Amino acid sequence: MNRVGIVGVTGFMGAELARLIIPHPHFELTMACAGSSAGQKLADLRPGFGALGDLLVAESDPAKLAENCDLVFLALPHGKSAEIAAALLQLGVKVIDLGSDFRVKDRTVSEALYKRPAPSQELLDQAEYCLPEITGAPSKDTKLIAAPGCFATALTFLLSGWPDEQATVFGVTGSSGSGIEPSAGVHHSLRTTNFTAYKPLQHQHIGEVSQTLSNLGKDIEIDFVPHSAPMVRGIHLTAVCNRPVEELETNYAPLKRHPLVTIQRGVIPMGAVIGTCRVLIGLAPNPDNTKTTVCVAIDNLLKGGSGQALQIANLLYDLPETAGLPLIGQWP
């Protein structure tokens, strides 16, 4: 068994990752860390883990993590990964970061997008950005992997087959994408009957999407308007392309070989991917087939977060790509 640790286990991403790793056939969760909750039972903090009994949350001590783990997942708030990642790398531990610290390779661009100091350029240069279906499996000798953001994942799938130099994309996301810390944007009484655009034309994930597309030789002007919806999980994107559906089916066809991707003609229900690590792409033509609506749906906590991080780990260790990943959606 490969020994893994999670730093930030009590957040949405960290807890979801623990839920996937605990029954995983090839990984053993040897350390579950969250500084503010150290010494408490994980089951007391997150009742869903009641079957684990006495598993204690530990301090995020790099030396203890290195002693007990071969791989550590960082599921920390944005801007909090760099220091502990650097310490773990010095101790020879592989790191997969679910946060934003290492996604954008240009330090100046990263600081402009996230309005905070970026990690050192040396650390950024070490990091490998991995969205497996688009960038390929991670290099086996890599030590630091940056997992994509949730909107960035969905946008990159949508734009990977986009034939034009400009795309206007309408996006919708659930409240869990904002993390576990309470705020007005995720407060139930404010969100449950509300629907609003936020960060229009300036969402920070555009930076990593443009970076990935550039590496693929694509230069697309992205006008992206995300919206907060009264739901907990899920991302749904919509864009209209002035091309016939057959052309777009050809463009997106290379994605069909990947086990987590489904492409179908017509619109797609977001509910079909909730609770799974799948990507659903829908191509819906207008009546005279001169335009096609392109839709992408993912679960933001799974394919947009913890599930994708585990998918990357599977590939890093030459395991079956879908090992431990939920593939069948909830109903209803």
Image (cartoon, grey):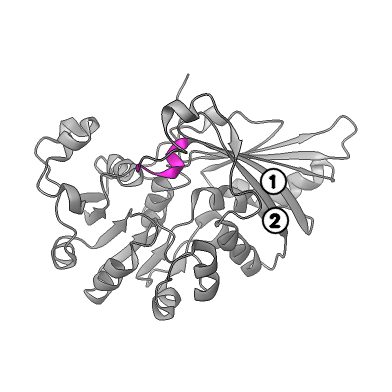
| Quarter of image, res 237 | top right
Q: Residue 173, image x and y in percent?
A: 54, 38
* Residue that numbered label 2 is attached to: 222
Label 2 crowd bin: few (<14), some (14–19), many (20+), radius 10 Å: some
* Residue 318 in magenta stretch: no
Judged from the image, the secondary structure of the residue bearing numbered disc 1 is strand
Q: Nearer the viewer, residue 328 or 271?
A: 271
Q: Nearer the viewer, residue 270 or 46?
A: 46
Q: Which residues are magenta?
A: 175-181
Q: Nearer the viewer, residue 26 or 297?
A: 297
Q: Residue 253, image x and y in percent?
A: 68, 48
* Residue that numbered label 1 is attached to: 169
Q: Which mark is residue 149?
A: none
| Quarter of image, res 241 | top right
Judged from the image, the secondary structure of the residue bearing numbered disc 2 is strand
User: Contact, CB < 8 Å: mark 2 with mark 1?
Assistant: yes
Distance from Cα at disc 2 to Cα at disc 1: 7 Å
Q: Nearer the viewer, residue 64 or 115?
A: 115
222 in relation to 125, above or below: above
Residue at left 41%, top 75%? Answer: 126
Q: Residue 122, image x and y in percent?
A: 40, 80
214 in relation to 242, above or below: below
Whether residue 124 is visible to the viewer of this picture, yes or no, is yes
Instruction: From the viewer's perspective, tell me whether residue 110 is left or right of residue 214.
Output: left
Residue at left 74%, top 52%? Answer: 167
Residue at left 76%, top 46%? Answer: 248
| Quarter of image, res 212 | bottom right
Whether residue 329 is visible to the viewer of this picture, yes or no, is no
Instruction: From the viewer's perspective, tell me whether residue 310 is left or right of residue 30.
Output: right
Residue furthest to the bottom in view is 122
* Residue 180 in magenta stretch: yes
Q: Amino acid at mark 1?
A: Val
